[in-house]
Image (cartoon, rainbow, N blue to C red):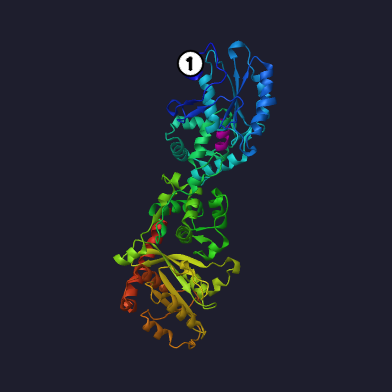
Amino acid sequence: MILFVEEFPAVVPYRAEEITIPADVTPERVPTHIRNYICIPFSANVICIVYSVNNKKSIEKVTSHWIPLINERTDKDSRVPLILVGNKSDLVEHSSMETVLPIMNKYTEIETCVECSAKNLKNISELFYYAQKAVLHPTGPLYCPEKKEMRSACVRALARIFKVSDLDNDGILNDHELTFFQRTCFNTPLAPQALEDVKNVVRKNLTDGVRDNGLTLKGFLFLHTLFIQRGRHETTWAVLRRFGYDDDLELHQDYLFPLLKIPPDCTTELNHNAYLFLQSVFDKHDKDRDYALSPEELMDLFDVFPYVPWGLDVNSTVCTNDQGWITYQGYLSQWTLTTYLDVQRCLEYLGYLGYSIIAEQESQASAIAVTRDKKHDLQKKQTQRNVFRCHVFGITGSGKTGFLQGFLGRNLVRQRAIKEEHKSYYAISTAHVYGQEKYLLLHEIFPDFDFLSETELSCDIVCLIYDVSNPCSFEYCAQIFKQYFMDSKTPCMLIAAKSDLPETKQQYCMTPLEFCRKHKMPPPQSYTCNTAVAPSKDIFIKLTTMAVYPHITHADLKSSTFWLRASVGATVCAMLGFAMYRALLRPR
């Protein structure tokens, strides 16, 4: 009441009514409800314990009565911040701080102590400012007063923020990166002199806080420790919240998983801006410029994650170099796969990398393109999609795994080096259709003929694989086709795998070629991964073309000119794509 009327009443009421300070008169722009507690049950975001500076028993009661009572009625894991308020400072000439300081050191939930006078209005406004600050910018999660150092959770969060902000990954924040950081967190540029002043403060206090005229991680952490020790918690909290952290210093669920509506029968892909961002992340960590991420470079990339997001099977899911390291193409393919199969996981991963901050977007949701329903593509006879799913069917031993690995350029010799526990049921890479780069996602389906789920049947193209040397192999393909795909609009292709082996007559009522003619499918395509070099990718171009253009006729599929145009376009586009990537890297 005194705060509003700005005068001390002659008769002080026993209990004041609840008062609300409007949001527009507070620095933090939040409404504040003030409740006078006497002995009724309470719930609060912050509690002010008032004692009389001229009454020793009043000070003793802080620890003998009030703090135990509050702790009794609050959860141990979520202590309410406390403000000690020494009232009636107008009656004494000395301060009570010397008496109160041991209490503050003992109870970490005490944020600060303010001495005030209700009679002459000294520090009344400041008291409620500190109360608001204790809720919005609490010290507890950031700093341990006993050890006089930042808490480990705060150090971890700030270390991640430093790593994300270090755009060239050289271990320092240069002037450009610091300016970008300042503008991102505080929406205001940092003057050159102010930038030098900051670095000079660090230099004077820390020998290795500044290197090559840039701020090191130690220097960055030192600055935030200094902010906290000087009572400027709001600065550190502004940084933490801008980078997605909540009051418990965990990345907020709303930050990691922004709202993204995906209508039925639509798919999710990364858009152009997302690929540019991911390319910059790759470039940032590919220190030796070999267009591949070594295990050390990959772990450095994942340093901003709370866990390693990719399992060991990723190396058999995407393209790798001769050393087994994920290539640039493989890296983008894995991101494309994650976006297609589990877009929520993709949003989470982009959140860890700081996509919305570095790309200056509202959230990770802006990185995702939601495609239109495939039915509309069929009606329009064209698609804007870039990722196409191919389900691969065949009995055990028919050559499905070899087919998937062949798509990634691995011949039989390289495939034998893959450990059983590292094998993947997915393979994804690019294929070029008429000069356009598309992603083909191969998914090996477990050969359970009796039951196929809706997910297993939902794809853009079906690949039926049989072993030419196994007389019982083709029958499974024929049965799968007749039961599940004969009346569907999903294009199908028959693959005669292990074509390097002697062909055996299949134990079925008609030959594979006759079966294809009867059901208006392309003729069986021969394939083998038992080659001296990388297996041919022609078959994968054909599969991708059929997925992109599901309405093409059987006559088109038989035309050699049709496939020649697709293959030539693929070769030219692949060469241009690699040349462009090298050109982008050259000036860096």
The residue that mark 1 highlights is 6
Left or right position of 29 against 202: left
Q: Quadrant of residue 388?
A: bottom left
Q: Where residue 192 sits: x, y (%)? A: 44, 32
Query: Residue 352: percent from the left, percent from the top?
Result: 51, 48
**Residue 482: image x %, image y %?**
43, 79
The answer to whether residue 365 is above or below residue 72 is below
Q: Report the number of discs.
A: 1
Q: Amino acid at mark 1?
A: Glu
Q: Is residue 221 magenta?
A: yes
- Is residue 193 or residue 424 the one in the foreground? 424
SS at mark 1 in the image: loop
Judge whether residue 397 is colored magenta.
no
Residue 446 visible here: yes
Residue at 38%, 69% (x, y): give it: 547
Q: Main secondary structure of the magenta part?
A: helix
The crowd level at tag 1 (other Cα within 10 Å; few <14, some 14-19, many 20+) is: few
Provide the residue span drawn in magenta.
219-226
Residue 409: percent from left, percent from top: 48, 69
Lateral position of residue 476 relative to residue 580, left or right: right
Asked whether the viewer can see residue 587, the reply is no
Closer to us: 191 or 394: 394
Q: Residue furthest left?
A: 380
**Residue drawn at (64%, 30%) of the image:** 70
Depth check, front residue: 432 or 513: 513
